Amino acid sequence: MSKPEDENIVEGEIVDETPTAALAIPSPPLPDPDYSEGGVPSFDFVRDKIENRYTTSLGAADVAGLGTENTAEALDKQIADRDQAAKDRLAQIRRSMRGE
């Protein structure tokens, strides 16, 4: 490709220069409408945040099956009733095996 006497030749690609656009200086950020200039949240913002958290917790309780008809107490009673029925059935099986 190159001859030994061409040591100063550098291979490269010619690129057309295109003018670069001037960089726009960003304007200072506008204050969030939910906050005052001092950084204090507005009453509406706080109320909305509390309402969102409350409705989220209601939804989570419904998903977990702890709605109005399936309370924790009702589930505990169902478990206790099932355990008692299992004990009664086991006692019945034992009596029948003894011939009573």
Image (cartoon, helix red, strand yellow):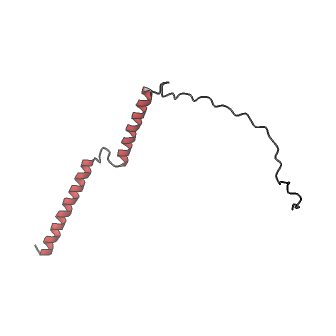
- The residue at the point 37 percent across, 45 percent down is 60
Answer above or below: position of 53 versus 6: above
Based on the displayed image, in which of its 4 quarters is residue 45 positioned?
top left
Q: Give percent across and percent down for residue 97.
A: 15, 74
Q: Give percent across and percent down for residue 84.
A: 18, 59
Q: Nearer the viewer, residue 52 or 66?
A: 52
Answer above or below: position of 86 versus 37: below
The C terminus, quarter of image: bottom left
Q: Give percent across and percent down for residue 3.
A: 89, 61
Q: Residue furthest top?
A: 37
Answer above or below: position of 38 versus 81: above
- Residue 91 is left or right of residue 18, and the answer is left
Q: Give percent across and percent down for residue 98.
A: 12, 75
Answer above or below: position of 28 versus 70: above
- Residue 70 is left or right of residue 63, and the answer is left
- The residue at the point 63 percent across, 31 percent down is 26
* Number of on-image labels: 0
- Residue 42 is left or right of residue 62, and the answer is right
- The residue at the point 66 percent across, 31 percent down is 25
Q: Residue furthest left?
A: 100
Based on the displayed image, in which of its 4 quarters is residue 93 positioned?
bottom left
The N terminus, quarter of image: bottom right
Based on the displayed image, in which of its 4 quarters is residue 81 positioned?
bottom left
Q: Nearer the viewer, residue 66 or 38?
A: 38
- The residue at the point 21 percent across, 60 percent down is 83
Q: Nearer the viewer, residue 69 or 34?
A: 34
